[in-house]
Image (cartoon, rainbow, N blue to C red):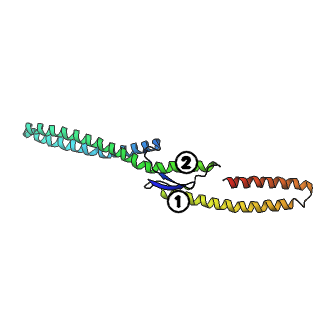
C-alpha cells in the first residue's frame, strides 16, 4: 500500500486486481508460456528416446527387464508431462502477476492524462504503487507538467501586460481602430481565462 497526496488529501493506493489490462496481460502471458512450453518440451522427448534405446537394448537380453523399464518409462513420461503442464500454468500466473506491474502504471498514466484534459479537474501529481515498474515515468510526467504550468504562469503575466497596454492604447486611437483593439482585448481575456482554468 502506498500513500500519496491528491487534491490536498492523503490517499492510500493499493491494487488488488491483477488483470488491469486483460488483453495485453493475457496475450503477454500466453506468448511467454508458449515459448516456455516449446523450449522445455525437448526434455520429455529426449528422455523418451533415451528410455526407448535402453529398452531396445534390454529387449534382446531380458524381456522382463525391458518390460519393467517400459512401465517405468511410461510412468516417468506421464510425470514429466504433468510437471511440464504445471510449470507452464505457474509461468502463466507469474506472468499475470508481473505484467500487472506494467499494466497498472500505464493504466494510471492513461487516466491521469484523461483528467488533465478536463478543465474542471485537477488530478494533482502522478504516483505509481510501490513496486510498480516505470516509477521514473511518473517523475518525468510530474516534472513536465510542472514545466508547462510555469510556462502558463509566465504567459499569463505577459497576456495581462499586453491586455493592459491594448486597453490603454484604445483610449487614444480613432474609433474605427478602437473596435479592432477591443476585439483583440476580448480574445486575450478569453485566453487568460483558459490559462486560469488549466
- All told, the count of numbered labels is 2
Q: Is residue 1 left or right of residue 169?
A: left
Mark 1, residue position: 139
Q: Position of residue 22 (x, y in %)?
A: 45, 41
Of residues 94 and 190, the one drawn nearer to the viewer in this rendering? 190
Mark 1, Cα crowd under 10 Å, few <14 / some 14-19 / many 20+, is some
Of residues 115 and 9, the one drawn nearer to the viewer in this rendering? 9
SS class, disc 2: helix
Mark 2, residue position: 111
Q: CA distance from mark 2 to mark 1?
A: 16 Å
Mark 2, Cα crowd under 10 Å, few <14 / some 14-19 / many 20+, is few
Please tell me which residue is depicted at 53% across the width and 51% down the height of the picture.
Answer: 109
Q: Position of residue 130 (x, y in %)?
A: 44, 56
Q: Position of residue 16 (x, y in %)?
A: 43, 46
Please tell me which residue is depicted at 71% across the width and 60% down the height of the picture.
Answer: 156
SS class, disc 1: helix
**Sooner in the amino-acid sequence: mark 2 or mark 1:** 2
Tell me if label 2 and label 1 are in contact, CB under 8 Å.
Answer: no
Asked if 112 appears above or below 71 in the picture, the reply is below
Please tell me which residue is depicted at 83% across the width and 59% down the height of the picture.
Answer: 167
Q: Quadrant of residue 87?
A: top left
Of residues 18 and 10, the one drawn nearer to the viewer in this rendering? 10
Q: Is residue 178 left or right of residue 15?
A: right
Q: Position of residue 121 (x, y in %)?
A: 62, 49
Q: Which mark is residue 193?
A: none
Amino acid at each position: 500500500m502506498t500513500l500519496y497526496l491528491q487534491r490536498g488529501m492523503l490517499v492510500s493506493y493499493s491494487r488488488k486486481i491483477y488483470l488491469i489490462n486483460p488483453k495485453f496481460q493475457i496475450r503477454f502471458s500466453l506468448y511467454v508460456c508458449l515459448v516456455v512450453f516449446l523450449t522445455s518440451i525437448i526434455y520429455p522427448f529426449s528422455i523418451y528416446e533415451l528410455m526407448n534405446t535402453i529398452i531396445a537394448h534390454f529387449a534382446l537380453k531380458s524381456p522382463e527387464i525391458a518390460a519393467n523399464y517400459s512401465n517405468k518409462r511410461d510412468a516417468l513420461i506421464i510425470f514429466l508431462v504433468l510437471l511440464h503442464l504445471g510449470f507452464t500454468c505457474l509461468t502463466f500466473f507469474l506472468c499475470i502477476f508481473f505484467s500487472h506491474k506494467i499494466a497498472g502504471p500505464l493504466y494510471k498514466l492513461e487516466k491521469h492524462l484523461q483528467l488533465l484534459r478536463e478543465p474542471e479537474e485537477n488530478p494533482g501529481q502522478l504516483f505509481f504503487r510501490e513496486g510498480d515498474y516505470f516509477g521514473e515515468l511518473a517523475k518525468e510526467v510530474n516534472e513536465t507538467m510542472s514545466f508547462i504550468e510555469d510556462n502558463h504562469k509566465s504567459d499569463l503575466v505577459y497576456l495581462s501586460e499586453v491586455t493592459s497596454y491594448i486597453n490603454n492604447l484604445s483610449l487614444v486611437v480613432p474609433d474605427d481602430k478602437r473596435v479592432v483593439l477591443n476585439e483583440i482585448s476580448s480574445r486575450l481575456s478569453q485566453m487568460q481565462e483558459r490559462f486560469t482554468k488549466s
